[in-house]
Amino acid sequence: MTKNSAGKTSLSRRILSIVLFTVAAVLLIVSIGGYIIQGTAGTKAQLNTMRTRAVLHAASGGLVDQIAEAANASALKEIRKDPNFRSMGTNEIQRRKDEVVAKARAEAEALYAVPENVDNDTIEQKISVLEEALLERDEIMSREKEAYASVFTSVTERVSGWVAITEGKTPDEIWNAMTAACPELGSHAELKEGMISMAGQMAQKEAEDAAKEEAETGTDDASAEISEDSMSSAAEVDYTWFVASGALNTASEKAEEKYADLWAELCNVIPDLATLDDKTCESVRTDIQSIIASADESFNIRYKAYVSEKADEILKPEDAGKLRVVSNAENFLLLGIAVLLLALLYTFWKPVTRKMGVPRSIILLFFIYLLLTAQFYKININLMLGDILERVGMYGVLALAMLPGIQCGIGLNMGMTIGCISGLFAIVVSLQYNMTGAPALIFSLVLGILVAIPLGWAYSLLLNRMKGNEMTISTYVGFSFVSLMCIGWMALPFNNPKIIWMLAGHGLRVTHGLLGSFAHVLDRFLSFKIFGVTVPSGTVLFFLVCCLLIWIFSRSKLGIRMTAVGSNPRFAEASGINVDSMRTLGTVLSTVLAAIGIVIYSQSFGYAQLYNAPRQLGFIAASAILIGGATTKKASVGHVLIGVFLFEGVLCMGQQVANAAIAGGGLSEVMRIMISNGIILYALTQSGGDSRG
């Protein structure tokens, strides 16, 4: 490249950077100005005026809808009187009906949309009184429903075997069994009748699910895989059995009384409201209460609620335009931040990518953009961050299992599924003997490690004989072992009725719920909320402790020798290091970590899945560590920490954003496959395919 062309390129980059920074500055200034205007007294007065008009429009809207329905029925009668009715097509009939209805609606809106002689002060006063009553009612309801949700979640998590606690039992015996499993339920005697009814329905559903699962073909069941779409561990709360307290009933009655006062005033303004039927009155009530309740929300929510009722028409054109711009202050802020980040990355591209690498830089920027987009679509980011932390704890140890394999020279250990199956075997043994709580978790971890050690050693012997083709061999071995265990899960002599096929009397089922065993034991340990983000402290701390132990090991003499073998096996051998022994050590350690990882994963997921379910876990773990900056020849604990957070963050946020942006959603699994396999392909191309032999 000549000096002139290089100078032109540099100048164009500077100009583009200046343009991007300027656009970002303008957007941020407009956003800040919008937020300031939102809090002014004049804006609040305009919103109150819009609220009164919105309430009147919602009330008159009931009349308009009723008149339109009557016009629709009348039009159909008139059309049927037409001699050519039977020869008319459906489209023609609908067109004629729509014309009549549109005309009737327009006339009704012109008649009722802007009532005359409106006493805005009186209506505004009654709206304010109703607003206070609604806020009081909603506050009490929110508090009581939160308490109910806590009890419901505890009951569904701690009570296991609904059929066992309900079959042939009296209501009191069922209640006693439920309170024994969930002591806090005993302080909610008002829920007794509802909880007993729930227990019956849960028992029926449990029996139906068991029968359905057993009736399905073995092929379909054995192909079940752990799906990213079913990762959420939060149980959906069913409020069917919620019982309102006396305080909530009193607050509801007060709100009803205040609404009646407002409705009477509205009927004075629009006398024809008294002719509304009960169904329309209920619809109007819902609309009015929704408008009034929005007064406690943010500016944007209030503004959009009022605009939906055409309340902005009461403002002067310049005021309406100003509020329209002000209402987009948050969008200007998000867009400004997005442009600013793009400008910074474009300006400092070389130093950033030199330090972080191109893939990690792009993924980090993509993750930040997902956060901004999630805010744009009003997705609960605090909830999503809690889910990301949970996923980090779930997948962290599995991703960490890749580290010893890379360090010892076998590359990406796709055969880590051997360790995963060892951990699953330990979990099934704990279920066989009905172990629960922390002891079940500890037992599964210890037994999983004991099973993984000899399997990992045997696996390492094969890899040592196939140097230079480890990744190919490990993939084949991992898949083959999963297929072999599909036979093993059917042949192993387990006999606990909770985990075997009931009709056959032998063979393990595909999915095993851990809610009655050790589900979420680590998640709940020292768990806390900060800024609305739920932190599963126990799981995250366990992952960090594992990372710390591996970091300490990698700096020990043994760990340094193992890393030396992975970096340069010929030099290590010349230095007197037993290459095969170090490769065996790394392979066994990787297999053991995989066994630990699947146990931690299962306790967070709430289920243990057998047969083909563990098949893709190696690809997910490999994707996570590679996205953190590792290669097939070099990796560190830092790569695991960064990679797991970015990988799970992109998948978690990407799923929600995709579902919000695209009707129907359902792209999360497609995204997982594309990202996972794409990252692995990129890493392999960067490694150059050099042999390690």
Image (tube, rainbow, N blue to C red):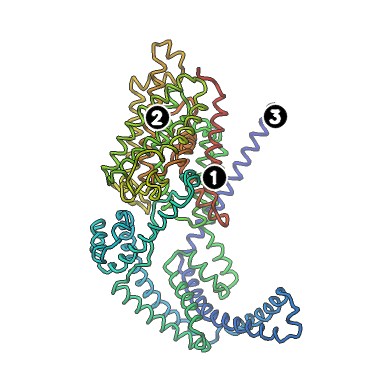
Question: Which numbered tag is attached to residue 671?
Answer: 1
Question: Which numbered tag is attached to residue 4?
Answer: 3
> What is the CA distance from the residue labelled 2 to the residue labelled 1?
27 Å
> Which one is in front in this view, the residue at disc 1 or the one at disc 3?
1
Q: Is residue 116 above or below residue 39?
A: below
Which label's residue is closer to the chain start, 1 or 3?
Answer: 3
Are the residues flagged by discs 1 and 3 in contact, CB closer than 8 Å? Answer: no
Q: Which residue is mark 2?
A: 590
Which label's residue is closer to the chain start, 2 or 1?
Answer: 2
> What is the CA distance from the residue labelled 3 to the residue labelled 2?
54 Å
- Element assignment for label 2: helix
Q: How far across and down, in percent of the image, does residue 459 sit? A: 42, 26
Give neighbour class at mark 1: few <14, some 14-19, many 20+ (Cα, 10 Å): some
Which label's residue is closer to the chain start, 3 or 2?
Answer: 3
Tell me the residue at 41%/80% (across/down).
259
Are the residues flagged by discs 3 and 2 in contact, CB closer than 8 Å? Answer: no
